[in-house]
Image (cartoon, coloured by chain):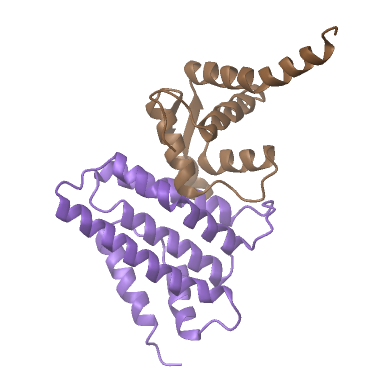
Chain colours: A brown, B purple
């Protein structure tokens, strides 16, 4: 998909919105598989986002300053006998992008509702 | 522990990730491989995952659908230099993809050939390689499993 500089593609917008929702529920960090699963659940999709698509989108969001990432403390995965996770956090700019995306998504519905309610 | 088919799908993802991170900035390539490894582990241990596909096919479809983005990501972080190296990379990627597809897809059918299962069982038993040498050793060892007497 060709994009204008600084513009988010739908998946990136959805990631920001989902990360903002996770944050409101108390989840400050998230990792790749977790966000893939949350996205699939939210959109009622049977398949998780493809590996390449997901991690490329996360990388772009990080490059744009909407996400920050860090590797978890190596002691945790060592204790749990699993590979380490890269943890992403939504930045203030990311939160603003999520709000903007939500506004854009609700605007047409609001306009339609206003049109229906307006006196003839 | 998942089926040999799941191991095959995971093996295909690992091989592909190795390939498209080949000869790129080591830290960047290692970070991508570690992230994919973590995702595969989470997928393998996620008993709550509901999908119309088997777990193995689910991983395989995620892998195939993400290939254009993997290549796009690689081009974005392109340090392939001259045209010859770039065209070698593309040809190698295409050949590996075709071989991986034709190697793996028949396994989703009935009666998977036992020699291939030897290779898959070997791959499943191997821990993810930490270094290039370890990876090459695993490839040779598991390729040898194909010729193990019945």
Would residue B78 be seen by someone viewing this image from the given angle?
yes
* Picture layout, residue A80 above or below residue A119: below
- In percent of width and height, residue A2 lies at 41, 35
Q: Residue at x 46, y 92 (%)?
A: B150
Q: Position of residue B6 (x, y in %)?
A: 55, 66
Q: How far across and down, in percent of the image, does residue B146 sit?
A: 39, 83
| Residue A60 lies in quadrant | top left
In the shown orientation, is residue B27 left or right of residue A109?
left
Up/down of A90 relative to A84, above or below: above
| Residue A72 visible, this angle | no
Residue B30 coordinates in the image, percent (x, y): 32, 47
Q: Which residue is drawn at 51% across and 67% down?
A: B7
Outermost residue, bottom direction? B150
Which one is nearer the viewer's eye here, A96 or A11? A11
Determine the residue positioned at 53% across, 75% down. B107
Q: Which residue is drawn at 48% across and 71% down?
A: B104
Direction front: furthest residue: A120
Q: Which of A76 and A53 is in front in this view?
A: A53
Q: In which quarter of the image is the N terminus of chain B?
A: bottom right
Q: In this view, does B82 lie above or below A58?
A: below
Which is more toward the observer, A74 or B82?
B82
Viewer-closest of A6 and B115: A6
**B115 left or right, relative to B89:** right
């Amino acid at each position: 998909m060709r994009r204008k500089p600084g513009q988010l593609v739908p998946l990136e917008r959805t990631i920001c919105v989902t990360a903002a929702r996770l944050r409101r529920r108390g989840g400050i960090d998230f990792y790749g598989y977790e966000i893939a699963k949350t996205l699939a659940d939210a959109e009622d999709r049977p398949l998780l986002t493809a590996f390449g698509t997901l991690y490329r989108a996360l990388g772009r969001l990080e490059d744009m300053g909407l996400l920050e990432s860090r590797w978890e403390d190596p002691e945790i995965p060592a204790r749990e006998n699993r590979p380490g996770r890269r943890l992403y956090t939504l930045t203030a700019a990311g939160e603003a992008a999520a709000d903007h995306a939500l506004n854009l998504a609700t605007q047409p519905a609001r306009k339609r509702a206003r049109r229906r309610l307006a006196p003839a | 522990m998942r089926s040999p088919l799941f191991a095959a799908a995971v093996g295909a993802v690992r091989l592909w990730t190795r390939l498209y991170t080949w000869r790129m900035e080591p830290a960047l390539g290692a970070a991508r491989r570690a992230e994919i490894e973590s995702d595969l582990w989470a997928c393998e241990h996620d008993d709550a995952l509901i999908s119309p596909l088997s777990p193995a096919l689910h991983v395989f479809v995620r892998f195939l659908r993400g290939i254009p983005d993997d290549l796009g990501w690689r081009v974005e972080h392109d340090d392939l230099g001259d045209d010859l190296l770039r065209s070698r990379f593309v040809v190698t990627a295409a050949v590996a993809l075709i071989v991986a597809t034709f190697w793996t897809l028949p396994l989703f059918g009935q009666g998977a050939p036992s020699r291939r299962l030897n290779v898959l069982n070997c791959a499943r038993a191997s821990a993810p390689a930490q270094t290039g040498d370890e990876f090459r050793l695993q490839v040779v060892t598991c390729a040898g499993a194909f010729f193990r007497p019945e």
